[in-house]
């Protein structure tokens, strides 16, 4: 096994004062393991890549051919991703760079490169940006393009003329990484850090633990005009079906209808709405009668609005978030995944995704639905895991 990682050098005096941003240098190292990762040995030739920079980090290695690998490294404050090529995973040579993304509010971090359509040579470049999103928080975007002669070439035509698309529209999803194993992992799998640099360092350990997202399966979905969207679907290997509905017609009297009470805090609610003659629909989640999370879908504006309970920790934050629903064509589907301390929302085959931490662990959940329509039809499937 090989591990590629960034080594940071700090000023010892400033580090003792918790000044972790005073970095003297960052460079890339290699360690090896011959016992399935139980123990590791530093490579005697470290560093394997060093340009004498203080902002040069987060290597990601991707195999692109037989005995041919690319390593992506972020020159974070310069807003550049460097591409290095190797045929032996030891000696690396820079072959290209990418900087053609206008999102340059904060540092670029944790790049990833994923082949999402091998036949058409379509690749997805992931970039995490540590600030510049809601409330100047962190976030992640993706760029679709092609890989030619070790150059990543962005293709706005794949993205309806956009230069990038938000990977996750919630406040709490950062630094995702795909799982790379050429023989065993197909399609691509990914998980991310469920947090934001806006408040991660101040988050108390009690009742607000650090955590990762659910593993997500990545696929490319073709939409209109030969454009594409990245689909993220939660990967749940085992789940127990709690309830499944037949078609329910939404009417004006269908207001604050209680679907479930006292649901365990690890569940997945999948819903569909067809007809789409309704203006809106709302799903709320309450604990002890208090609403802790609300999802409001506006079909007129093709957007989803989410309100998160403020609680003690999030009291100073703006807690309503909005995302454009990118692909509504006659029906609407949404999955809401709850895991005690987090909520992840997957809309229209996972083409619009929002991830949230919640201010306290939720359990014994009540689920309520509201909607107004003459003919739209609602279905649901509730599973626990």
Image (cartoon, helix red, strand yellow):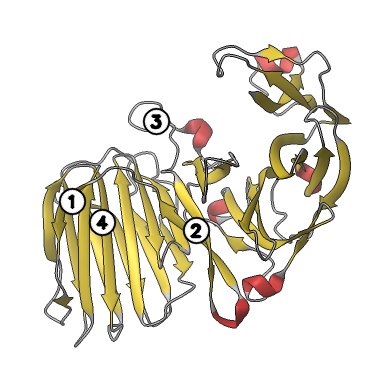
Q: Secondary structure at mark 1?
A: strand
Quadrant of the rendering where the C terminus is positioned: top left
Count residues near mark 1 (Cα–Cα under 10 Å), then give few for <14, some for 14-19, many for 20+.
few
Which one is earlier in the sequence, the residue at label 3 or at label 1?
3
Which one is earlier in the sequence, the residue at label 2 or at label 4?
2
Q: Is residue 41 above or below residue 245?
A: above
Residue named by callout 1: 241
User: Percent from the top left, x then y, of residue 77?
Assistant: 77, 43
Q: Is residue 177 above or below residue 366?
A: above
Gap between marks 4 and 3 measured at Cα:
23 Å
Which one is earlier in the sequence, the residue at label 1 or at label 2?
2
Q: Are marks 1 and 2 in contact (CB under 8 Å)?
A: no
Which of label 2 and label 4 is nearer to you? 4
Q: Are marks 1 and 4 in contact (CB under 8 Å)?
A: no
Which one is earlier in the sequence, the residue at label 1 or at label 4?
1
Q: Is residue 225 above or below residue 60?
A: below
Q: Secondary structure at mark 3?
A: loop
Gap between marks 2 and 4 measured at Cα:
19 Å
Gap between marks 1 and 2 measured at Cα:
28 Å
Gap between marks 3 and 1 measured at Cα:
28 Å
**Camera-nearest residue between 194 and 377:** 377
| Location of residue 311 (image quadrant) | top left
Which of label 4 and label 3 is nearer to you? 4
Residue named by callout 2: 169
Residue named by callout 4: 269
**Camera-nearest residue between 151 and 343:** 151
Instruction: Name the residue at 30% across, 77% down.
Output: 280
Residue named by callout 3: 209
């Amino acid at each position: 096994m090989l591990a590629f990682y960034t080594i940071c050098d700090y000023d010892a005096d400033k580090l003792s004062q918790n000044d972790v941003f005073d970095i003297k240098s960052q460079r890339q190292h290699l360690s090896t393991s011959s016992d399935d990762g139980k123990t590791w040995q530093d490579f005697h030739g470290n560093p394997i890549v060093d340009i004498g920079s203080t902002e040069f980090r987060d290597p990601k290695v991707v195999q692109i051919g037989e005995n041919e690998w690319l390593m992506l490294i972020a020159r974070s404050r310069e807003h550049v991703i460097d591409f290095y090529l190797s045929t032996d995973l030891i000696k690396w040579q820079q072959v290209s760079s990418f900087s053609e993304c206008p999102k340059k509010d904060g540092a670029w971090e944790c790049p990833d490169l994923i082949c999402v359509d091998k036949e058409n040579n379509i690749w997805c470049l992931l970039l995490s940006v540590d600030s510049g999103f809601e409330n100047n928080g962190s976030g992640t975007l993706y760029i679709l393009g092609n890989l030619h002669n070790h150059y990543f070439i962005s293709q706005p035509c794949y993205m309806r003329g956009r230069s990038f698309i938000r990977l996750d529209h919630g406040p709490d999803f950062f630094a995702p990484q795909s799982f790379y194993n050429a023989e065993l992992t197909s399609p691509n799998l990914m998980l991310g850090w469920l947090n934001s640099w806006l408040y991660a360092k101040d988050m108390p350990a009690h009742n607000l633990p650090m955590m990762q997202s659910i593993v997500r399966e990545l696929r490319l979905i073709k939409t209109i005009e030969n454009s594409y969207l990245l689909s993220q679907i939660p990967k749940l290997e085992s789940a127990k079906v709690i309830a499944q509905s037949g078609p329910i017609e939404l009417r004006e009297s269908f207001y604050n209808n209680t679907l479930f009470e006292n649901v365990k805090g690890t569940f997945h609610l999948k819903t569909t709405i067809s007809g789409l003659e309704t203006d809106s629909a709302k799903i709320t989640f309450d604990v002890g009668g208090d609403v802790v999370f609300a999802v409001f879908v506006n079909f007129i504006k093709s957007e989803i609005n989410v309100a998160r309970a403020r609680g003690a920790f999030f009291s100073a934050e703006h807690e309503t978030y909005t995302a454009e629903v990118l692909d509504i064509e006659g029906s609407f589907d949404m999955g809401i995944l709850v895991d005690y301390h987090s909520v992840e929302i997957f809309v229209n085959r996972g083409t619009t995704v929002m991830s949230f931490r919640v201010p306290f662990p939720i359990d014994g959940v009540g689920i309520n639905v509201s909607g107004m329509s003459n003919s739209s039809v609602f279905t649901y499937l509730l599973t626990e895991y």
